[in-house]
Amino acid sequence: MNTFLAFAALTLNYSSSTPLTDEPTSSIDENLSLQFFSESTHFIEKANDWIQVEHDFPSLTQKHLDPFNLTLNPHLKNRNQWKEYTCIPFENLMPGDIILFGSAEDEIQAVGIYIRDDEFMHVTSTENKSDIRIHTLSDQEWDTFGRFSYRAGIRYGNPQKEPLDKTSPEKIESNESQEEVQIDVAKEIDKEQIDTAVHPAPVLTAFLDEQFECYYFNEQQIPFVISPKDSNLTLASFQAWVEVHQHEFKALIERDGALLLRNFPVETAEEFGSVLKSVLGRNLLDYRGGEGSRRKVAEGVYTSTEAPAQFKIPLHNELSCSNYAPDYICFYCDIAPAPGSGQTILGKTEAITQDILLHPDIWNFFNGRNIRYISRHPPAGSFFSKVNVTHKTWQAAFETNDKEEVERICQARGFEYKWIGDWIEVTRIVPAIRGPDAYFDHPYWFNQAHLYHGNPRIRGGWLNHMLANLLYIAPHTSQYDVLLEDGTPIPNEIIYAIYDILDANTIKFDWNKGDVLIVDNRRGLHGRAPYTGERRILASMAP
């Protein structure tokens, strides 16, 4: 990072400090958002839990600092104030220190609470809603994209506490009291798998206590894997327990982009849907108007895209071709494919965005422009849907036989549409690049141009490409077209470069029967590797 203070921290000592309270007082500046105060105790409890030290945070009035809303009053933006503090090395930051960021030395624009290993807590607020998020100082919004740089740290409470030993393998024990739902621990996990796994730093996982084994398969740290140690764990007891910890589970998913529940007693599509509701606290979405070749299995549960097994489905964010992309895309392994094949591949939005930024020809082609996605659906029984199983009829795509209902769905979701005989043509016009928004503080790659684009590479070679062109020789029958909004075609060389970037950022793990994978659809991408033999993966979406 480029900083004026060169990784310096400032120490401010108090002999005592007043904990943040739930109720606002008359001394609180009126420009602070009172909507956050009712949740302040919950935030402080989680901060203490994740930091793993006893800590009294300052009151809202001390030096005008608001650690819950994590904003600063204008009084603290006076650069002369820093002269009264003593600088200490950045590497001596300790859990609980308040760290300050800004794009200029004299303007503090963001505040976090330092945890350990360069990770810190930060609260983002949008549209009267606040979310606690975990960042690292190398995250793009704090580094690569140049929005903020680390400026200083403020220490409250006891300054004699030593920083945690980052090299110590000893696990930090949780101070969290037992919840009403108890889960005994006993189950042995596959020892060889655990020994070769990458174990996470003990951040955000204290609530899991000793009841679960937590690890990563890879250095990219996606997905975060949780397995129960109790072989007698029932689905009902797990769901009751996880509902108490929905906030922590969602924070884990947001932190890593994907969460894998392995060795839990999930055996049916209905149980899969039920577990998702417990973890996420949200109802599942339908897939009406979606483009993937999925079949409904249970309420809110569908088959994953049923493309021919020999084809790879490139990484993508689900329904990024629309303005109603779900927050979560989730998968359940009903029949595991052969080891080394058929994986649901994963990628991280930030890493892919960073790589695309290194290719100005790609970024500049799409930046600030909308993409026009066009799909065409034949009627039930069509020859085209029989020859190409991925070409959905409009009855299958919209889950209805009623044309008026199809039109209502299109209108509700902002689709342009027109009937061409018994066919329907649907057009979606959305930005190629999204953000800054509630998900990222910077622009990020979020589109499916590479999936809609008809080219030899995605169709499996020139022969397949020519056969597809022959099948869809009549323009009104073409399954997909993708253009910029103004009609500019997207060149093959740009799409191929995107494929290469996605391939370079692809992460794989083998499925086990019963696995449940929950992907943050903004922070994580998914796709499918080719396979032979049997494979049955179910999918669900949640807002």
Image (cartoon, rainbow, N blue to C red):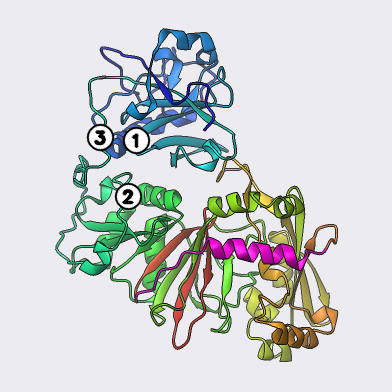
Q: Vertically, is 3 above or below 400?
A: above
Horizontal arrangement in the rendering, residue 89 relative to residue 288 (left or right): left
Q: Earlier in the sequence, mark 1 or mark 3?
A: 1
Q: Can residue 334 be seen?
A: yes
Q: Residues within 10 Å of mark 1 (few under 14, many from 20)?
A: many
Q: Residues within 10 Å of mark 3 (few under 14, many from 20)?
A: some
State if disc 3 and disc 1 touch (CB < 8 Å). Answer: no
Q: Which residue is mark 2?
A: 245
Q: Residues within 10 Å of mark 2 (few under 14, many from 20)?
A: some
Residue type at mark 3 is: Leu
Q: Residue at left 64%, top 45%?
A: 443
Q: Which numbered circle lies on residue 115?
A: 1
Towards the viewer: 52 or 334: 52
Q: Earlier in the sequence, mark 1 or mark 2?
A: 1
Q: Residue at left 83%, top 79%?
A: 476
Give the number of the mark in front: 3 or 2: 3
The secondary structure type at the circle numbered 3 is loop
Marks 1 and 2 sit apart, C-alpha to C-alpha, by 20 Å
The secondary structure type at the circle numbered 1 is strand
Marks 1 and 3 sit apart, C-alpha to C-alpha, by 10 Å
Q: Vertically, is 150 above or below 508?
A: above
Q: Vertically, is 232 above or below 216?
A: below
Give the number of the mark in front: 1 or 3: 3
Q: Which residue is mark 3?
A: 164
In the image, which residues are magenta? 489-512
Q: Earlier in the sequence, mark 3 or mark 2?
A: 3
